Image: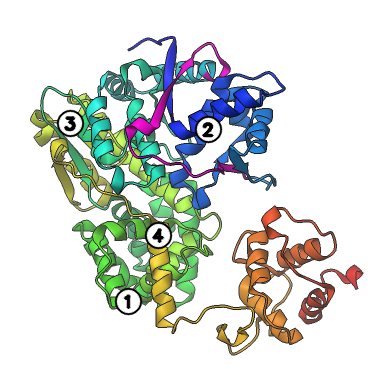
Amino acid sequence: MAKYKKQFEISLPTSLYDEVQSTIKTNPPLFEYEIEGFYGMLRDITVKLYDEDNRMVPLSSKILQQKYGRPYRKMLDYMRHHNVIIENHQYTEGKCRTYSIKNAISINGVDDMTVIPISLDCTYGKYVKKRHNKEQKLAKGKETHFKQLRKGFYKMELDVSSALEHLENNRDRLSTEQFVTIYDDIICFKKNCMNRRYFKRNNKNYRVDSNLTSLKSYYKKFIIADVDLYQLDLKNSQPVLFNIILDIIYKLINDDISLEEIFLTLSYKNKYIKETISLIYQWIKKDSKWVDILKKEIPIYKEYTSNGTWYNHIADIYNKHYSTDIFTRNMSKSLWMALAYSGNYSEKYNTSKSAFEKEYKGLGRLLRKFKQKKYNKLAICLQQIESEIFMDGIAKRLCDKGIVPYTIHDSVIVNENQLEEARKVMSGVLNQSLGFPPIIEEEALNDLEFKVKYDAEDIAKIIDAMELEINDNKKYSSTQKDSYPTIEKSILDDVKRGDTINIKQFMIDIYNRLGRDIDIDTILSFQMFINQSEATLDEVCRAMLNVFKENRYPLSDYKNILIDKDMIMVVEGVVSQQLYPSLL
């Protein structure tokens, strides 16, 4: 195990680094600070910009204080005041404040990145050292195979110079945010950055996270080894693993198994899956229509996923639905992740789900049922199942046979001379867990191709544009209320206290009841104010009162919400029990 050096390195876009240097020199902070703290917080923001919506990165105040000390808040305020960063100031319970870089970052290549040494004597350096020591201590108590995997990872070397050269040559194929993130991931493998390495098990999804799992797939080809390395990968792994849950549901609706008999199955080690399957089973049995639909759809799903063509099938569904040929397998992979794991009322992806849910009514309904309480639970559960299969099954058996692989969630990397035995172990464990032999892809790391990952949000925008075209480019407008979709009966005719409502349609009905022109800006802002597309009537009424009576806005961007007493009275007038009679 490599020992700690006296420093480690991080990276920042040179333009941002120079901006901070100039700002501090021109306007010295009037408080005690460590320059490394400024660099560290900016690095925290820039490396995460690519993965976050609207380029706003959530940062935990608790972690910020641990990493950069008590002055962290003053440092953030200083950078915001001097237009280095922007910040969403408003606090929302259970959510971190979000940050971004104020000015656009310009990067032409690796020369536009600055590598910054961080001393282990500063607060930031001590945090990194403490985190590493904690990881080492926890690793001592882990299973033998985990120790072996960790030791093998820390011995691994990467040809950093060649990786950076390739990154330079492919600058035009990457966004600035992607380039910054990949650059920082690569330099973590420099020999003098050993203390930035990490190999730890996630407490939430049980996956093993490391610098290797965060590195863009292509750059794994730069791992230095005496013999050729190969990657064994479970093809369309997340859809395949969902079969474990679907198989239980399928057996239940066919009366091949009872609820009491399935407690020992793999997925039933997860309490959430146990409870959700029980609820889903009760829902299905109430309506024979869904039993018939799922009896038909689940075997079709299993066929496509087991033979490794699920993503191709998704592409075919969308190409057929929109009479196009633009959807590819790679696009469908990103699209499926959004369809399966985004919230049920996600404004961003709900339109994108229509083509799939038209083709698979039962599976679409099942996915929504799994996410009706907490939308991220399904993804976490499948990751837990994946981790149990790959880390506690495949990786452990390989280590027992003297093969210590590099692990990357749903794949393993082994030497060429270990390939046959590794494939045999992997096939055996997967077959035992799934009940069928899935497709395992084999690829030499030297043959990896550079691919730009499709962003699910960009694909969703393409679908939104297609939907607009299908609907003759009709769109919502404050002066064109006739362009809004109509329904046979207003929500206001039947709504009762405690009912869940679609906020957008609910607000449209209020405007129509009052005979007013529809103000779409207020409707959209009010949706964001409540932070979901559907809510109970009680929640909506409280939110309306909050806007009207107390004039409080949780987020400064929503100050254009226009709700008045007449609108609230309309709502109260149609509810069976008045929620807030004191208002009148």
> Which residue is disc 3 drawn over?
414
Nearest to the observer: residue 339 or residue 26: 26
- Real-space CA distance between mark 2 and mark 1, rounded to the nearest whole angstrom: 42 Å
- Real-space CA distance between mark 3 and mark 1, rounded to the nearest whole angstrom: 42 Å
Rendered view: 23 above or below 83: above
Mark 4 neighbour class, 10 Å CA radius: few under 14, some 14 to 19, many 20 or more: some
Q: Position of residue 80 (x, y in %)?
A: 64, 38
> Which residue is disc 4 drawn over?
458
Rendered view: 348 above or below 446: below
- Judge from the rendering whether residue 559 lies leftward or rightward of residue 341; answer left or right: right
Tell me which amino acid carries mark 3: Val
Tell me which amino acid carries mark 4: Asp
Rendered view: 360 above or below 172: below
Would residue 173 be visible to someone looking at this image? yes
- Real-space CA distance between mark 4 and mark 3, rounded to the nearest whole angstrom: 35 Å
Task: Return the mark for residue 42.
Answer: 2
Camera-near label (4 vs 2) is 2
* Highlighted magenta segment, given as a residue range: 95-124
- Mark 1 or mark 4: whose residue is earlier in sequence: 1
Tell me which amino acid carries mark 1: Tyr
Label 1, secondary structure: give it. Answer: loop
Q: Position of residue 47 (x, y in %)?
A: 45, 37
> Picture quarter containing residue 578?
bottom right
Give the colour scheme of this rendering. rainbow
